[in-house]
Amino acid sequence: MKLYYSPGACSLSPHITLHESGLKFEHVLAPTKTHKLEDGTDYYSINPLGYVPLLELDDGTRLTEGPAIVQYIADQVPDKQLAPANGTVARAQLQSWLNFIATELHKGFSPLFSPATPAEYKTVVIDRLQSRLKWLDGELAGKAYLMGERFSVADPYLFTITGWAPHVGVDISGLANLTAFRARVAARPAVQAAMKEEGMLK
């Protein structure tokens, strides 16, 4: 398998998940600014939408969209219990978390990275994000991870997206449960391995 990624982007989530899975994979740098691979290949020829992550399977099948990719990875290694079994209430709860992170947080942060976003609109975006994050902090009370005591594929996604906060003026320092969650996830060997490969840790 090949994972196309850009350092610190949402592709960090499947990158971490692949390390957690123990599956063999190759990580391929696909910078979101240049869209050129190191060998000169135009990344748009691989993903016409130009964004990461993209997971290319050994048979050439290409999967896009982080929440779908991490569930696929989890289902390849059921013994690792990175996701509950399909068809269970717990799997639906996991998908609820993945959807919340994707729509309320991930897409919520997007306008803050655009120089074209008016300053007054950024204030509205930050307020909305902070209300969602405050609610999330409450949901993490008394839990090690989003699904309880067991780490799941929703956790690296939340870790990745909330890692953007200090870069765009979203203050999460007062959210004790989220801060503790981030420290807990950051300490995992798979997380450190993925971040090192992306040049985010020495």
Image: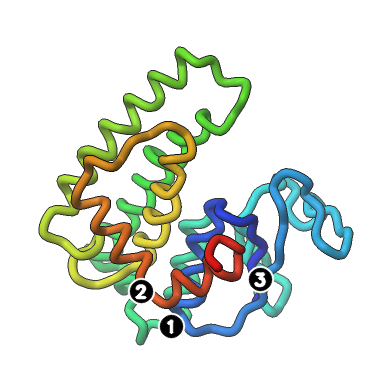
Which residue is found at the position 71% from the left and 62% from the top? 29
Asked if the residue under mark 2 is in contact with the one under mark 1, i.e. CB atoms within 8 Å, the reply is: yes
Compared to 94, does 21 lie above or below? below
Q: Residues within 10 Å of mark 1 (few under 14, many from 20)?
A: some
Report which residue position mark 3 lands on: 27
Which residue is found at the position 77% from the left and 49% from the top? 35
Q: Residues within 10 Å of mark 2 (few under 14, many from 20)?
A: many
- Which secondary structure, mark 3? strand
Q: Where does the image place residue 93, in percent across and percent down from the top left?
A: 26, 57
Q: Nearer the viewer, residue 133 or 43?
A: 133
Q: Nearer the viewer, residue 57 or 19?
A: 19
Residue 54 located left or right of residue 165? right
What amino acid is labelled 1 in the image?
Val
Residue 154 located left or right of residue 117? left
Which residue is found at the position 69% from the left and 47% from the top? 32
Image quarter of residue 124: top left
Q: Which mark is residue 82?
A: 2
Give the quarter of the figure containing the N terminus.
Answer: bottom right
Please identify, in this view, whether the residue under mark 1 or under mark 3 is nearer the observer.
3
Which of the two labelled residues, at mark 1 and mark 2, occupies the earlier sequence position? 1
Q: Residues within 10 Å of mark 3 (few under 14, many from 20)?
A: some
Which residue in the rendered view is the most extreme toward the front?
Answer: 202
What amino acid is labelled 3 in the image?
His
Which residue is found at the position 54% from the left and 15% from the top? 118
Image quarter of residue 126: top left
